[in-house]
Structure formats: structure tokens, C-alpha cells
Image (spheres, helix red, strand yellow):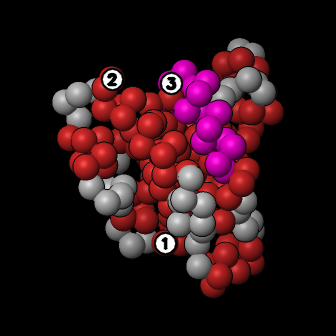
Amino acid sequence: MLLAEGAARAEAALAVAPDDSARAGLYFWLGSAYGYRARQAELQGKYWRASREAGRMRDALERALELDSSCVDCLLGLAVYEYGLARASALARLVARIIGLGGGNADRAMEMFRRVADEGVLTRTEGQWLYANALIREAERDASLREEALRIVAGLAEQYPENPVFRRFLSGPGPAP
């Protein structure tokens, strides 16, 4: 409900935004709302709705980048989108291509994750966490990536010592789902 209201407010504000800078910011927030709505739908098992919301997120974040190419924070949602599609099952990728969502690109997604983790302003911590989790998953293909993931999460655990998720990651066999 709150995500729908946030998306509606961002859409309404876009109609009266005074300039491209304001529109870029609004598209970022709109894309963020759509991204969280997609995740919520996925968790509820509503996969068609999740794919629709994910497509909306991608479109909004791409518009934000068209207006402000320096919006590194916009890359986080796009990285999640690209990585998720790239690592989905062959059948899911086929269906995604058929309905116009694309096929994903893991290498491009990893580069976007890295940029957000290094340069993000609003999404740096989340970007570091997601990048570390993607590195752990990619370590199945290249074991050297595991060390970088552990280094990133150790930094997060140092910065946020009360966060049990980071400590669990460092002491357990891998990332939380």
C-alpha cells in the first residue's frame, strides 16, 4: 500500500517537475518503488506482477540515467534486474525474452554492482551487500571472488557492528537468501 502511494506521488510529481534534474531524481525514486513492489510480488508468488513491476523499475531507472548519466545509485536496481535475469533458469530467460524483459547480462550486472558499491551515495551500503552476495554466487565459477566478498562484508560488519546479518555471513558457509 505504501509503495503504491509512493509510486503514485512520484508519478504525479513528474508531471510538474521543473527541470531534468528534478525529473531524474523522481525517476530514481519511482524506479525504487517499482523495484520494491517487484520484490514484494515475487515473495508473494505473484510472478507475472513481479515481472511487470521489474520492467517498470528498469524503464524508470533508465529514464533517470538518460536525464542524469552520473546517477550511480540508479545502477543498483538495473544491476539486480540484469543479474537476476542472467542467472535465472533457461526457461525463465526464454519467457523473459518473449515478454520483452530481455535476457540479462551477468558481467554488466557485476560491473554495475561494483560501481554502486564504490561510488553510490544513497545506495552504497545496499550496493556493497548485494555485490558481496553476487560475488559469492559467482565464486562457484571463480573461487577467487569469495575473498573479495568476505572483505566487503567484513567492512560492512565493522561499520555496522550490531548488524547480525553481516556477522552471520562472515561466520557461515555463505550469504543469506
Residue linked to disc 3: 122
Residue type of the residue flagged with mark 3:
Leu
Pick the residue in front: 127 or 11: 127
Residue linked to disc 2: 159
The correct choice, above or below, for 127 with respect to 57 in the image is: above
Q: Residue at x 65, y 82 (%)?
A: 90
Residue linked to disc 1: 47
User: What crowding class fits label 2: few (fewer than 14 Cα within 10 Å), some (14-19), or many (20 or more)?
Assistant: few
First in sequence: mark 2 vs mark 3: 3
Q: CA distance from mark 2 to mark 3?
A: 16 Å
The image position of residue 56, as x and y in percent, is: 63, 52
The image position of residue 169, as x and y in percent, is: 31, 49
The image position of residue 85, as x and y in percent, is: 63, 65
Give the overall secondary structure of the magenta segment.
helix
Q: CA distance from mark 1 to mark 2?
A: 35 Å
Pick the residue in front: 157 or 56: 157
The correct choice, above or below, for 71 with respect to 48 in the image is: above
